[in-house]
Amino acid sequence: MSLLPAQILALMPSGIKAFIEGSSRRDLLRKVDTCLLVFDNQVAQIETGAVIEFHTTPGPIDYGRLALACKALLGGADARECSILLLVPPSLCIATHQKLAGITSDSVVSALLLQSDSMLPANEHPVTLAINPKATDLSEEPIAIWMRSETMAEIFAAFAQQDLFIAAIKPRVLNLESSGARYLDKDASTLTVVESNQNVVQKWLQTNQADLEQAEFLQQWQDALTDDDKVEQIELSSIEHYLELTDKFSNQDYSFFPQGALQARRQVEKGRKLMVAAAAVAAALFLSSIPFFVQSIQFRSLAATLEAQRELSFEARQDQAIVVSFESELGPINDFPDQRVREAMFNLQNALSPNRLSSLEITDGSINIQGTSAEPQAILQQLEQDPMFTEVAFSRATNNDRYNIGLRLSTVNFDAYLVRYFPEQ
């Protein structure tokens, strides 16, 4: 099974893992607009109770026909704006029990992923895990639910062809109130018994109805169900039974998220982070220039440049798709030399005070200052001793007490930046 990416993510510290995932799963669930429940050849919209049939044949569900039926149920073109939680037959899932004594809730996911090959030896396909991390607090042998990643991708792709967005997939029998009751899901092909309490699955039994025609299997099934006769059992043998009891907020940790949905959510988050970063950079530049507006017209020019940058960032916010498509070309922006303008201005002020500064120019890390002083040479020496400046020299001969000094910021190398990103210039 190809589980390496999920295993690496699960083994990371919780803080790093949360940063990488960007809370995509919680965001997808929070933004769900509607729940659609599949039962045999019917699909229902939970919010309205509307039911529609779709043509199916014995065997696996035809997800293309299911998607067409869902689009019709949601009103055709109006469905494009919907984010869907799809409630599927429990037969699409596999449940495993694994003894995890001493494993904390923070480590349960990584522990199960590391043992997935031994728990599912007959499965050669990539699978996705769903479990409430708090399951180990209630049992040393928690129940994990697995679904084939290929099945999730097929569902997402079929619905995407109809312009429908599947945000999450969940077994329908886990979309019921988690109160400790026993639910018996009975459709045309499969029987599934589930108990959950405090949003943690505590029992999951499943069998094909055809197997119960054999007396031995039937006896084993009945024995498994009579281990606790005091538990209330609720049979769910039709789509109407589900419409009466469904609760989309229960057992949310047992939701499965197609990679297509996660990637779409992460692209939105990435665009949002870029906008915040652009706004922060613009604000920092603006604040750093405030103390020097009163000294020269050049600082007003800097304010105009800042305003232009803010307009550029606004344009980027207006079209996130363009920002995302050009993310591979953000190197020139990310590596743009930091001229540390504010720090440079304070260092210049310390060197020049109390002498008068009449002109200041900053271009690509080069600074040219003009002013008057009784001791221009002393100013030159003081600037040479400041590690922030280099190549300090009189750019013109002094005239009485007037001076013209050129210097460069030692931390800025615009030539190297241009060679790397703009060699043609």
Image: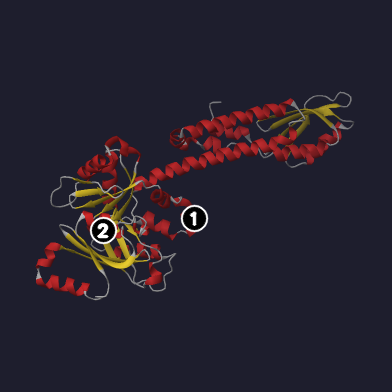
Location of residue 208 with respect to 227 vertically, above or below: above
**Mark closer to the chain start, 1 or 2:** 1
Q: What residue type is labelled 2?
A: Cys
Q: What residue type is labelled 1?
A: Ile
Q: Are marks 1 and 2 in contact (CB under 8 Å)?
A: no
Mark 2 element type: strand
Is 292 left, or right, of 185 in this rendering?
right
Question: How many labels sit on residues?
Answer: 2
Task: Name which residue lies at 78% across and 31% down.
Answer: 393
Q: Which of marks 1 and 2 is in front?
A: 2
Query: Which image quarter holds the N terminus?
Result: bottom left
Marks 1 and 2, how far apart in space?
29 Å
Task: Name which residue lies at 35% across and 60% down.
Answer: 251
Residue 201 visible within the image: no
Task: Name which residue lies at 32% across and 64% down.
Answer: 144
Q: Where is residue 270 in the image (x, y as percent from the top left)?
A: 47, 42
Q: Position of residue 11 (x, y in %)?
A: 43, 60
Q: Residue 93 carries which label?
A: 2
Q: Mark 1 points at which residue?
A: 16
Question: Which quadrant of the structure image shows residue 162?
Answer: top left
Question: Which quadrant of the structure image shows residue 283?
Answer: top right
Is 203 left, or right, of 271 in this rendering?
left
